[in-house]
Image (cartoon, helix red, strand yellow):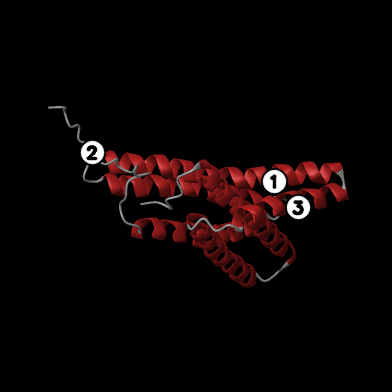
Amino acid sequence: MDLQIHSFIKRNTYSGANALVFLATSMIVNAFANTAHNLALIFAVSAMAGLWLAVWSRLVHNLVKAADPWISPLIGVATPAVLLAALAESPHTLLGAAVLLFTSWLPYMVAESAGQALRVWAYRSPLPQARLLYLTAQAAVDTAAIGGIGVLLVTLGDGRTVRLAAALALTAPLLLARAVHRSQTRRVAATPCPRRPAVRRVSAS
């Protein structure tokens, strides 16, 4: 019922890939909202950036779920490259980049780990409304974690009223896409274990 990314390693890859793009996109929207004077244009650019994040998130999910051999090495190279570029600027820039990457990675990791636990609960629960409760709780976690960090990253600095609206326009398509995706996936067990064939014991006559 959720993104169905079971293992910690896969969730980490998924979160890392989203964190890099989410951070870069948020910084771009932040800078644009800080310099542009046309409010409608700011909203339009923020909404388009949010659609891009939604498409990227779904693409990464499909690659991770399909065990694509390139996605993990790509993220493993891209993250140190960003940190090395920050170190070339200054040690303070490196520290800031590391903190921002971590704060962008953590919400995705929290959301996916919580989603895994909630999905298992909904699968095992006898309550008829368990699926609805799961989807509601997962949407709340996504909004608090991913939406919260998006608002934080975009509203850094002055002029927070305009940039708050830009942050909402940025995160709304991503959160909506995640909610729709989860609501459309079928109900499956968390990690089905293969059943061993029964072994018949033949007693000696």
- Depth order, front residue of 174/37: 174
Q: Quadrant of residue 21?
A: bottom right
Numbered label attached to residue 82: 3
**Residue 144: x %, y % from top left:** 50, 45
Residue 9, image x, y percentages = 55, 44
Q: Earlier in the sequence, mark 2 or mark 3?
A: 3
Q: Position of residue 115 (x, y in %)?
A: 43, 45
Instruction: Please give the name of the residue rendered at 45% of the width and 45% of the height, measured from the top-left corner.
Output: 6
Q: CA distance from mark 2 to mark 3?
A: 53 Å
Sequence order check, earlier mark of 1 and 2 = 1
Residue in the picture at 87% in, 46% down? 90
Q: Residues within 10 Å of mark 2 (few under 14, many from 20)?
A: few
Under circle 1, the secondary element is: helix
Say what secondary structure mark 3 lies in.
helix
Q: Residue beneath label 1, please?
A: 100
Q: Amino acid at mark 3?
A: Val
Camera-nearest residue between 21 and 141? 21
Question: Where residue 181 appears, x then y in whole percent?
Answer: 41, 59
* Spatial CA span between label 1 and label 2: 53 Å
Amino acid type, mark 2: Ala
The amino acid type found where label 1 is placed reads Leu
Q: Is residue 33 left or right of residue 6?
A: right
Residue that appears at 26% across and 39% down: 125
Which residue in the structure is indicated by mark 2?
198
Q: Nearer the viewer, residue 165 or 179?
A: 179
Front one among 36 and 69: 69
Quarter location, residue 180: bottom left
